[in-house]
């Protein structure tokens, strides 16, 4: 298997080529009055969590076409994230999904992660599937269910997930509440929301003092008429009523067509209520494609708001996580492309000339405002991202390194061709 | 011109036919345990305001094709609403738009309205156009504008509109804030929203004790990248921060594709923050078509929530208004069709078997819940609506009455073929 | 189990109630100059095929919550369709999906179907999943695949499906081609379409003289960037190039937001190229909800075009099929509701006053045209549908009959609680 | 006013800076095996037509906020396009709209244009407005109208537009047919399409031998229920039935949400039926924003198909035109930004490594295909575009040159502040 040393050797071999690319863009930015070093520093410390379910091949309701070499256990998932982090130096945390990844020995798991330089990010509960031994069914909802027994079970499950997280050093619970209805009349909207609020309150009360709960929203799927938390407005209502530790979580794919997501980000940060992000991209619905593979400019605009909000609001620190479904691509390759796309957008947002933008806004100079943003977006910042990555010990070109070292082939040899990652 | 007497005579002529239609549906409902009389009473008192700009032919950015006989003054607009109310007995209020309809003599205008049985509903401000004598321009916004002078002008205008309303007996101000941006970077989302909130606060502070302010939202148009109040969540944020007299207003056409509007209605009522409605329908964008002409079932589902919310929440009394653009149809005919469609939906929502629905929901009996709603919607309630209308002195068939009496022809004779209603 | 006799007895018991409902609506229609008998005759002979996969509980990519008592074999699927047909007298055909329903003994299966009064409708091929013993993988497409071996396999499969259909008496092959791409660059659009056309030509050449091939289209899912046959235009291009036996198939859920499907229906019939329908409904994407449960007026407008096209074009006879996913409701109950909704829409389209509509169109009388369509849609035609159903031997109220006879309970007793229908 | 000489002097002053930016990107591309010179040559000859209505401030149905200095006559419009072409060397043609720009003296107008280096691109007819002296009204359609007199008038108008075009040296007629309906029932879809086809045939028969007719499509607006030519499928049907000189025209804003426009481009070119483009961008509907200001990656993907199609199909040569509405920005500035964005996308499409893309497609290497396209898109090609522009005599930085020379101020001084361009 590939080692840190291999990476460093290869980086040395690429040094001249890298300098040829890096110097001109650094010069151009310096000419524009930008402090390249300070931008690199921000890139250096930027870390995006990897969900444990992202290491296997995803599928649709119609079919699933596995890739081979998928991790068969939580230990192997941690191995894969470790590998990824070794390559890109930007994914130092793993986000577990319970019950798919229940750690039998939390201490051992924590040590394994630590040996790969990994922490545990937000833990995720699951009340959208019935487990084989389930006492109740979530067919008609969980936290919103009309039957108190089902709600109690779902609340208990969430508390248990928090407990698992505490044992691993997590500091947040993410609640993606899949509850909803597929036909008019099925649910009473108000009562379902009220029950959900009451259930969340009980979960909230179980949170340790230094924890957060992130409340996700989604307009449809797996239910096709209504979701109990369909939009940021409802998520914000709930988070506000719960208390300071409750925040909204934005998943990029969870919006109606044409939604201005960057504005939602700005408003939530203004309210100090943005908790974090699930990164992916989509053309039609919740397509779960690689982040920025479809609408990279919108993604840059979102980061533009994030950078602005991190500088100018009192919003708490954000959780960053990838949440895509790798149906056709090697999951690790897909994650490499995703991390690269996120860091490019972040770098572009960091080089926005905010003084010029502010001036254009103050004078309603629309053309100039557009120029400022497009100038940042059109700048090729890949060499900056590579520079930062190599400084942090990552690979000059993670995708190429992954391929040249035939890592998937090795994983298949080790784990087999017909494995299925738990939870898929 | 047609008189109350003409209408009553015609109703008498239609009595037998009406009974033939009314009796079976009344019997069917009675068989289902429904108290038909109580439903008729609710229909009797249901009134929908007519906006003053709805009496003329609307247009698109490409063209406008006037119909002829359009009202040339506020007095003639009142006349038209009076005529409408005489026909349908359900539109006893007019909603003015300032500065298109500034009453020179409030007392006289009030008396004229009163002589037609009309009240004055919410008054509407306009900061989306530059008036010929304007001191500032709203090209780049009004309440959100970066320039304090522009904001102050817009605030002063809104206060003035309240004052006009006070003189006429209105009890609410509707703020459709058209502010927004058409290109990324043009506006700072947070700062624009903050300025808007501050401006609204000043307007709010000018409200008489028994007034409300209704805060409308819209995702796009006239700006095409962002609107300052794009969705119910933002409207609700503003209304909450302003105080108890501030409420959200739902315009049916102001939503992204596929939005579940009925759920928004339910959530706002649950928060006691739904102020009222602008009725229209759309297939693509803010098409401003006749209400229920495209999606009558969704409209029924909205009324289903309204009826449920009026029975089971402490939401304040609602303002109802039509807000459509009559581009191709005779505006009065279009309004007749709109009022009919609204009352049909209301009647259908009133006959929903709520006990059966509640039971179906409590047992997750999805098929049964669907049956309950579809049973109400599939019931032909037109004879109920006609019965109530005739009891209140309206016409058996308002559209036919309007046509048979050749009222448009008379209006053209009186007012001319090439008139343009003020504001169009 | 319930018998024809039980149904007839129950119908007799409901006779008086039915007459009370039927007579007034028949009178009203007669008053409007409509020949009620001729409409009943059209309803009598209207039959909608049931796909073999509709008898089990469907799911999403997240979960599946089975109902119990699902058919475990093709024989039991036929039994279920037979039961359905006994109840509603409108579903006299079953549409098989290969390889989920390969008949081992075609003759015996045909006889079994015949004993239930059932025929075999269009057969469906499946090249969107890899079967356990598959020689090639459809992960990256089938008829469009870059590798000739895969295309040849997919072509051979389709020919085999035709052969199965021939043995059963089917007269059509439905091709839902799930091929597409999830990322820009993955496929060359032109080359993929060219390969698809060539593959379809080979399948077309295998069709018996009296067969049709129905070419379905879909904008996205299971691929999320492009589908090889995304819209009616592409389906029509292919069908035109293939020849007279090739026609387009419209699945209601396979359209982008806001699509005017009724216009597509009209244009395809004008070109004599509409082959048939997959009935379902949706609010967001390809939600596969019960037909007309979300947008019944659009569904009526589609039937309005179908009735008009069947009278005024030379379009070949149409294939009608339900294609929904019964995730939350008992599949048989859901199918009962679907058939009812289809017949209601058909009845409403049949009572449209076409002379009045034509006159309104000829004079650009938009209000009158709207009145004509709304008059038909607002008419409660349920008693007409019931009258026709009972004349044909079906039940007065199929859903109630299904429930009162506790048929699901019996099926569970017989087949078990944890069955999974083949293909789900 | 600014002269060619001013531009060349300024370019000389910027030479060193330009080289500093150009050399690294040229080197990088050369390293990738790309012939930079051949790409520059393609950029040199690329020309985009400017519509005559784009020189003034546009508006919405709600308001219009003029900028000042707008052209008051056809001559002044030509002057503005001449100025633009002097700045960017890429807009050597003007596209006229009749009757807004009827040339009184075609020869003189042609000479004026020629003196600015300008040709006449496609001429545009207008049957979506009633002119003051109109004998018939287009309120209810034109080429599709139920009344033959109206159709004949609309046909005659289109023939007249062709005649004007012939006098000026145009070679194409663009038909944007705004005909449609706003309410179900208003139009018979089939009959309206048949009448449209017949009308178009008469116009087609009037085309000179070396002319084309470009048939535009649009799903909605100015009608809000149906358009007679709603989609590429219908446009293609019409163009196919008319003959070889008829082609489809794609306006980027004329699509339903989420449409894969690049695939439509590919399919039309495969059919040899793509005639040209109207460039703009949109977030919600037909927003008419500056091209690539919202979705630059999709725009690049479209150009990727165009470049591929121009190399690998027999599609006729394409017409390129900007068609945006400059509501908030100085129209000339907006056009400068638009031309820049188009050339950037074209340059990025030209540097796509097509051999690598083909290889990735042939092996279903999805990650690699994505890398190829993203590599081209992420490359900062602005220095290439500038290099080509300066070689052709244009300005190093057209927007800055326009501003530094205070051209708008001069135009206002010359033409006045309250001018309105004809047609706006």
Image: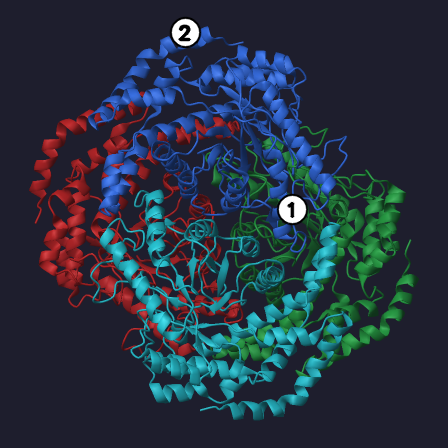
Chain colours: A cyan, B blue, C red, D green
Q: Position of residue B387 (x, y in %)?
A: 34, 17
Q: Position of residue A19 (x, y in %)?
A: 69, 85
In the image, residue A349 sits, relative to residue B356, either above or below, namely below
Mark count: 2
Same chain under badges 2 and 1? The reply is no
Q: Tell me the quarter of the picture where residue A162 sits.
A: bottom left
Q: Which residue is painted at 38% across and 28% down in the image?
A: B344
Q: Secondary structure at mark 1?
A: loop
Which of the chains bears the disc numbered 2? B
Which of the chains bears the disc numbered 1? D
For this view, does D76 lie left or right of residue D245? right
Q: Position of residue D373 (x, y in %)?
A: 58, 72
How crowded pointer 1 is (Cα within 10 Å; few <14, some 14-19, many 20+) is rated as few
Closest to the observer, C107 or C127: C127
Q: Which residue is mark 1?
A: D205
Instruction: In the rendered structure, find residue B9 and report the number of the disc placed on it.
Output: 2
Closest to the observer, A346 or B341: A346
Closest to the observer, C204 or D288: D288
Q: Which residue is painted at 56% across and 71% down in the image?
A: A341
Instruction: Name the quarter where the N terminus of chain B is drawn.
Output: top right
Q: Secondary structure at mark 2?
A: helix
In the image, residue B303 sits, relative to residue B105, either above or below, namely below
Q: Position of residue B304 (x, y in %)?
A: 36, 35
């Amino acid at each position: 298997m590939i080692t840190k040393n291999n990476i460093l050797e290869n980086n040395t071999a690429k040094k001249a080529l890298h300098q040829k690319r890096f110097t001109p863009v650094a010069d151009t930015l310096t000419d524009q009055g930008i402090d390249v070093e300070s931008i690199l520093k921000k890139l250096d410390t930027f870390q995006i969590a990897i969900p444990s379910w992202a290491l296997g091949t995803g599928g649709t309701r119609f079919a699933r076409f596995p890739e081979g070499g998928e991790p068969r256990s939580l230990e192997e998932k941690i191995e894969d994230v470790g590998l990824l982090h070794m390559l890109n130096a930007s994914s130092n945390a793993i986000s577990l999904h319970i019950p798919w990844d229940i750690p039998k020995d939390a201490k051992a798991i924590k040590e394994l992660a630590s040996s790969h330089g990994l922490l545990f990010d937000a833990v995720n509960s699951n009340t959208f599937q019935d487990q084989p031994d389930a006492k109740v069914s979530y067919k008609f909802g969980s936290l919103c269910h009309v039957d108190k027994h089902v709600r109690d079970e779902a609340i208990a499950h969430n508390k248990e997930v928090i407990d698992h997280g505490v044992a691993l050093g997590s500091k947040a619970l993410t609640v993606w509440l899949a509850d909803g209805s597929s036909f008019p009349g099925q649910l009473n909207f108000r009562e379902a929301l009220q029950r959900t609020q009451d259930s969340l309150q009980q979960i909230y009360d179980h949170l340790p003092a230094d924890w957060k709960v992130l409340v996700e929203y989604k307009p449809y799927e797996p239910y096709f008429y209504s979701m109990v938390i369909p939009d940021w407005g409802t998520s914000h209502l709930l988070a506000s009523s719960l208390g300071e530790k409750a925040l909204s979580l934005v998943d990029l794919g969870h919006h109606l067509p044409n939604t201005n997501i960057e504005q939602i980000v700005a408003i939530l940060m203004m309210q100090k209520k943005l908790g974090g992000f699930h990164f992916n991209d989509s053309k039609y619905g919740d397509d779960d494609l690689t982040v920025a593979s479809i609408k990279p400019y919108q993604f840059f605009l979102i980061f533009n708001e994030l950078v602005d909000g991190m500088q100018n609001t009192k919003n708490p620190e954000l959780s960053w996580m990838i949440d895509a479904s790798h149906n056709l691509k090697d999951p690790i390759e897909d994650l490499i492309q995703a991390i690269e796309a996120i860091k490019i957008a972040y770098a572009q947002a960091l080089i926005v000339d905010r003084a010029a933008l502010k001036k254009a806004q103050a004078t309603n100079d629309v053309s100039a405002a557009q120029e400022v943003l497009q100038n940042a977006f059109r700048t090729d910042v890949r060499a900056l991202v590579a520079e930062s990555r190599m400084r942090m010990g990552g690979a000059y070109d993670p995708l190429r390194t992954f391929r040249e070292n035939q890592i998937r082939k090795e994983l298949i040899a080790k784990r087999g061709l017909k494995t299925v990652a738990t939870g898929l």
